[in-house]
Image (cartoon, helix red, strand yellow):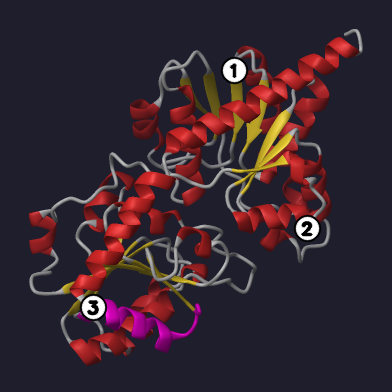
Amino acid sequence: MNILFLTDLFLPHAGGARVYYHNIYKHLVAGSDDSVTILTTRIPGWQEFDNGQSSASLRIVRKGHPMPNWKYYQLPRVIHPLAQGVLKARSSKADLIHFGDLCPPGVVSVCLKRLLGLPYLAYCHGDENAQIDGRRFQPIVRDHIYGGAAAVVAANEFARQGLLRIGIPDERIHKITPGVDLERFRPMSPDPELFARLSLAGKTVLLTAARLVPKKGHATALHAVARVHAETGNIRYLIAGDGPERNRLETLTRELGLSEVVTFLGDVPNAQLPAYYNLCDIFVMANRQASDGDIETFGMVFIEANAAGKPVVAGRSGGAAEAVVEGATGFLVVPEDAEELSARLKMLVLDKVLRERIGAAGLQRARTDFQWKTRAERLKHISAEILASGIKSATSTGR
């Protein structure tokens, strides 16, 4: 089976969806005769990443640059990725198209189905629906793209419910939640150099690893940390990630008197994330729905932190309730309630036994329920069913 996967963005671009795609296809081709060609765009750091990750069965092809937005005046820019899609579908002898972004990959997939007769499988993470619902014309395009898919993979229950709401039949929706790389994300001793450089001795360490954007809830976390620090005085808060909110959050940190408590780490390379999870005692991300509809649809970081044996605290928003088992692997709080968040954090800061119990439960769940291999096997089965269905259809009509 030869799969052509179209995505506007791919690693090393930050984001849970990009990690999802990389892992599921890496495991799909492992030890099999299947091949996947990933057609995507050039972004900073792509050469080094591709050199380390491409193989004979998993080929990464980069053409052009990412789409800046999904406005109607960007439609002419679809011509280039469409031409590249046609060429790559033919040269790779693709049996099936998969796509990860509605535009341009989703639009291109619809065209490839009509031009080359190739069926396509679509992904939905949930934020696509939340952000597009309020637009004028985009919902029509979205519904047409998903409606023409042979199958739609919902990456979480939030996404599945959104697809049902827009009329996609339940039998064509297949939920495949993210997994976690258990070889990389596992309990390890803190890196002594990092530990010393960040002056963490004698401190209970909190960590957020996320882009600095409104939906991640950093501002609420900072207000909660200020309360916990005032009452306990022995915490440090590490913020890994960068983004448009950084200046505002650094200003808020100073206003709250937390300059000696909070450290902005900036962008942390994906390869170094396990070391930072193992520096912390508690992982926190008070995710919420942003004003533009952007929302945390699952929260892979919660599973990664659990896989490192850490308790987590999340916002009760979007799909986080599927990633965190309330009271067992972590806690869920009202996203913008700094008082509730501070109460949960204070409880974990002061109770090491509770931290260890919840961290152990999270680790067990990550190892049992979130293996990438099983998710890749499911995707392979769905893809094979699509192809088998097409063969039967062609045979029954005499083609």
Q: Secondary structure at mark 2?
A: helix
Q: Overall secondary structure of the magenta stretch?
A: helix
Q: Residues within 10 Å of mark 3 (few under 14, many from 20)?
A: many
Q: Which residue is mark 1?
A: 2
Q: Is residue 347 magenta?
A: yes
Q: Earlier in the sequence, mark 2 or mark 1?
A: 1
Residue type at tag 3: Val
**How far across and how far down the image is residue 74, in percent?**
72, 48
Q: Which residues are magenta?
A: 334-350
Q: Earlier in the sequence, mark 1 or mark 3?
A: 1
**How far across and how far down the image is residue 167, in percent?**
82, 51
Q: Secondary structure at mark 3?
A: helix
Q: Residues within 10 Å of mark 1 (few under 14, many from 20)?
A: some
Q: Is residue 159 left or right of residue 209?
A: right
Q: Secondary structure at mark 1?
A: strand
Residue type at tag 1: Asn
Label 2 to label 1: alpha-carbon separation: 32 Å
Say which quarter of the image contains residue 150: top right
Q: Residues within 10 Å of mark 2 (few under 14, many from 20)?
A: few
Residue type at tag 2: Arg
Q: Which mark is residue 349?
A: 3
Say which quarter of the image contains residue 39: top right
Whether residue 89 can be seen here: yes
Q: Check the image and report above or below for 218 versus 265.
A: below
Q: Which residue is mark 2?
A: 165
Q: Is residue 127 magenta?
A: no
Q: Earlier in the sequence, mark 2 or mark 3?
A: 2
Q: Residue at x 39, y 81 (%)?
A: 341
**How far across and how far down the image is residue 374, in percent?**
47, 35
Q: Is residue 69 left or right of residue 167?
A: left
